[in-house]
Image (spheres, rainbow, N blue to C red):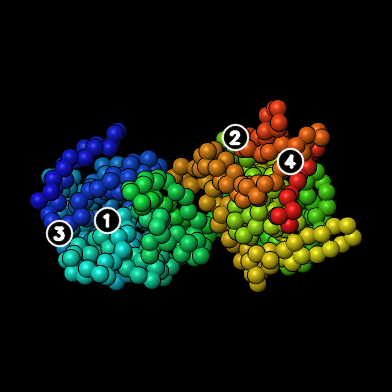
Amino acid sequence: MEAGRFCIDGVGEWEVLAPPTVYPPREDTMMLCRVISNLSSKLGAKVLEVGCGSGLVSMVLTTLGWEVTACDVNPYAVACTRGNLDANGLSGRARIIEADIGVDLPIQEDTELIVWNLPYLDEDVDNPGILEKIEEAALTDIPHGGWGRVLLHTLENISTTLTENVMVILVMRTEPEGSSRVRDWEESGWSWRSLSMERFGSEKVEIIGFWRTGSGVEATIMDSCKSTMDEAEGLPRIGWQRVLSSKQTNGRGRRGSDWISDEGGLFATWSLDAELLDRFSPGLVQTSIGAIVSRVLGANMKWPNDIVNENGVKIGGVLVESANNSTIRVGIGANRTGFVEGDVAGAGWDETLGEVDSSEVFRRIDRGISSIFETKKMIASAKIDFLRHLSWMELSRLLSRGVLTTHDDKVYRPTGLKDSGELEMVGVVEKEGVRDLDGIGWIIPKSCV
């Protein structure tokens, strides 16, 4: 019998006993408990814990005031969790059941949170039989999408109301990627945010929070409009709001310039809460969304808002505008195919993604922007360091190939990004921060073209 005392500052302390056939609290368990202790929720909100093991997570949730239902396929884990609840003065305050995910797991309609410390060890095909079957269920993931996909499919096949509102928090191995993968949830229309991360040797384990993008609020879709930026002014002020148009006749770019809009491209605008500007500068909002778009399109990002191909030819751009109406409008335009019109040439995402239509590109970008900027009261918002790191990582894909900048007839090497979104550059004798694109030139080495 393994025993231990565990403490979460500001929450409580618990004595845990675990027999050999039950997964005891480990570092990943404590990671999950710390994340749970920082969640915001109303008293008595319903939570389901899958794979309760020794019961520590259930006890933390119960102590915090959640209405807990916990399950495990291992009958010894069910008995262990009940025993630990009793021993810690929590008898009768949680419902502990034996159930198998995807088979007989009851999920109440008004459940607000599902948590699971997913089994993430790979099956040891060279040494089968080392673990008992009960232990394998607690420690080992399954192939072809893992237990994460089993949970995802379970949620997809039940009430739409539940999936629109529930938050799912999973412990996942992200390096090396296990069978349970974040991208399976992305492809099914879920946004996500990393809530905690630890490295254990060569492995990176993360706590990921998933939610349905927009909580069921669909985009406003139009056949044609003058400008999605203008149309976004009329969107509701509540919820995750965005407008997508198949055609745009009078799109605009930076400083009111025209945006050439060939049919088949992407023309969309997101309406974000202006309170974001209390935490992030408009410049950093612009570069971080540009980073999302460049990743989705498999392209490069040129500071501050251009999405370009490997030759520096523009595929699309990001435009951020704010007004005194409590919203920030983020317009994104991108070409599906390249074109030449007079002296203007553009590239398209068909070079990088192939035959992907604009609706799918929109969905991918929508999930990416939601993952950073959609407000979810239960979990914390993204931090400024994350936005700056994301922006710089994408900018570096082009800059690392020897791209230089010019400003006031001087040549500089970009070296970083400030919290304000300004580009930091180092010259021969001086260092400079550049806030605005005006006066900036780019030198792209011939090897890049």
Q: In this view, does 143 lie above or below 290?
A: below
Q: Which mark is residue 21?
A: 3
Marks 2 and 4, how far apart at CA: 20 Å
Q: Is residue 358 above or below residue 271?
A: below
Question: At x 21% / y 70%, what residue is drawn?
Answer: 128
The quarter of the picture where residue 262 lies is bottom right
- Contact, CB < 8 Å: mark 3 with mark 1? no
- Contact, CB < 8 Å: mark 1 with mark 4? no
Reading the image, the residue beneath label 4 is: 405
Q: Mark 2 falls on what kind of element?
A: loop
- Which label's residue is closer to the chain start, 3 or 1? 3
Q: Mark 1 falls on what kind of element?
A: strand
Reading the image, the residue beneath label 2 is: 419
Q: Nearer the viewer, mark 2 or mark 1?
A: 2
Q: Is residue 301 above or below residue 411?
A: below
Q: Mark 3 falls on what kind of element?
A: loop
Reading the image, the residue beneath label 1 is: 69
Residue type indicated by callout 3? Thr
Question: At x 28% / y 46%, what residue is drawn?
Answer: 27
Question: At x 59% / y 56%, what residue is drawn?
Answer: 295
Marks 4 and 3, how far apart at CA: 62 Å
